[in-house]
Amino acid sequence: MSGLNQLFQHLLGRRGADAGCDDSLEVLDLFVEEELEGRRAADTFPAVAVHLESCPDCREDYEGLRELARSNGSAPRGISR
Amino acid sequence: MAPHAPIPPAASAKALDEDSRRWLDGLRSGGPDGADAVEALFDLLRRGARREAERRRGSLPEHVLADLDDLARQAADLAVAAVLRKLPEYRGDSRFTTWAYKFVIFEMSAALRREAWRGRRTVDIDDDAWRRLADSRAIDPAAKTELRELVSTIERCVATELTPWQREVFISVVVLGVPIDVLAHRHDKARGAVYKVLHDARRKLRAFLHAEGWDAGRAGEPT
């Protein structure tokens, strides 16, 4: 992407329908798992993908959740039988 | 931590993976088993919060680094409460741990942003702030000139077309890099409400740029 387009995107956000923060966070776990399972989450949740490229806070949260989901914390043995 | 009451199962749950099922069964049971499950959840989320802090370590000031353990515990506590409150809505569409991590990421990141910006002004723009915005993305002199012209046009639009609140949000978030969470916290608003203001400001800017002859039509489309 050229410097001009980078600046446009930084200033104006990405074009397209934007899901907003609340709706994006609602499905962020599904979005992350789509990606971790090798599917294109942006195809399933296009408005969320637009939002994550336009909202720096949600983008950072998405990156953090993706890292944690990769680590896959499993239930300790014995918490339920 | 708050006493744990048994939580009713969701009205209709799809097939769960074994691990998610064990978490759900544990958290939904009352008595000692339920308390053990809540304790295990707290520990999982505390470690998750700590890992998130480590991931962001490079961007955190010293005074925040000293408090990471406390911040992680507080975030985990709030996240456990949110998980237990929302548990009846969990349908198993994602793994339980991914779903639960979402709450602690949200709590921890908001806390880290607030602490990192504690005592700092959110709108404190200097004369060079706009120029830095252009120069950080330009490689050759011709591109730098074009970017500076663009930034100058944006600056004019921000000064004349945006409302005072839109101006504060746009300058803070886009020009100065203030987290939206920090603005939201200081104005007692939700992140989504502040983002909506930014979104509306960007729409005005896009229209203004178009009227000024800038081809922003394709900018920001997926590549």
Image (cartoon, coloured by chain):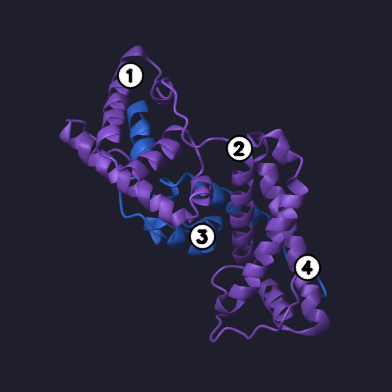
In front: A46, or B161?
Answer: B161
Name the residue beneath numbered marker 2: B119
Quarter the N terminus of chain B occupies = bottom right
In front: A17, or B196?
Answer: B196
Which mark, by number, is residue B215? none
Name the residue beneath numbered marker 3: A28
- Amino acid type of the residue that numbered disc 1 sits on in the rendered structure: Ala
In front: B9, or B199?
Answer: B199
On the image, the x and y values in percent for residue A61 come to: 55, 51
How far, Cα to Cα, is label 3 from label 4? Answer: 23 Å
| First in residue order: circle 2 vs circle 4 | 4
**Relative side of B22 to B123, left or right:** right
| First in residue order: circle 2 vs circle 1 | 2
Secondary structure beneath label 3:
helix
Viewer can see residue A79: no
Viewer-nearest of discs 3 and 2 = 2
**Relative side of B68 to B148, left or right:** right
Marks counted in the figure total 4
